Image (cartoon, helix red, strand yellow):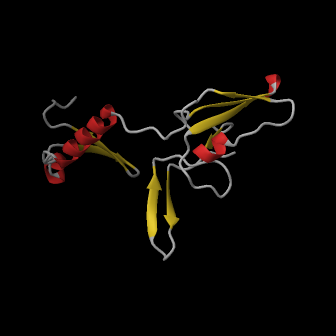
Amino acid sequence: MTPRRAWRTRVRPGGTVHAVGGVRRCSRTACGRAAVATLTYVYSDSTAVLGPLALYAEPHCYDLCVEHAERLTAPRGWEVVRLAPDLSPPRPSDDDLLALADAVREAARPRAPEPAPAAVEAATVEVGRRGHLRVLRDPSTPSPT
């Protein structure tokens, strides 16, 4: 299974395009619900392990929504180990909300003006040229000769 993209667009009925990002979706075909659990297999022990949603999407793991996680069955002779008793979607923590508020404040702060390109070019002296590359010397340092 290939890793999913973090951002994609989804077309709603009526032709409206909405951006979907940051939320991992259920790996089951044609299911667009949010994933709440991760399924992995231990082939040597004939065991399917259903645990809490992994921090990162792994290529050999399957993210499942509540419905598919609850209805999960394993092949005959296999054991299912359920490590995630609570399959409700996690709520944002206070730390997540504070980090988001800090990011918004940082983006809203006025930024210091960058030096004008003409001032930077005036402060340097071209010493040589090789193809498209230029050798520049800072005028504040003494010349080697």
Between residue 30 and residue 74, name the one nearer to us: 74
- Is the residue 14 above or below the residue 130 in the image? below
In this rendering, does residue 37 appear at all?
yes
Between residue 18 and residue 142, name the one nearer to us: 18
Between residue 34 and residue 72, name the one nearer to us: 72
Give me the residue at 48% from left, 47% from top: 23
Does 93 sit left or right of 123 as displayed?
right
Image quadrant assignment for residue 124: top left
Of all residues shown, which one is farthest toward the top?
45
- Is the residue 118 above or below the residue 39 in the image? below
Does 114 sit left or right of 18 as displayed?
left
Q: What quarter of the picture does the C terminus occupy? A: top left
Q: What quarter of the picture does the N terminus occupy? A: top right
- Can you give x and y, in whole percent of width and height, for residue 89 in the image? 48, 41
Give me the residue at 81% from left, 27% from top: 46
In this rendering, does residue 65 appear at all?
no
Of all residues shown, which one is farthest toward the bottom?
14
Does 20 sit left or right of 143 as displayed?
right
- Can you give x and y, in whole percent of width and height, for residue 12 in the image? 50, 69
Give me the residue at 17% from left, 46% from top: 120
Give me the residue at 18% from left, 48% from top: 108
- Can you give x and y, in whole percent of width and height, for residue 66 in the image? 58, 44
- Can you give x and y, in whole percent of width and height, for residue 9 in the image? 49, 62
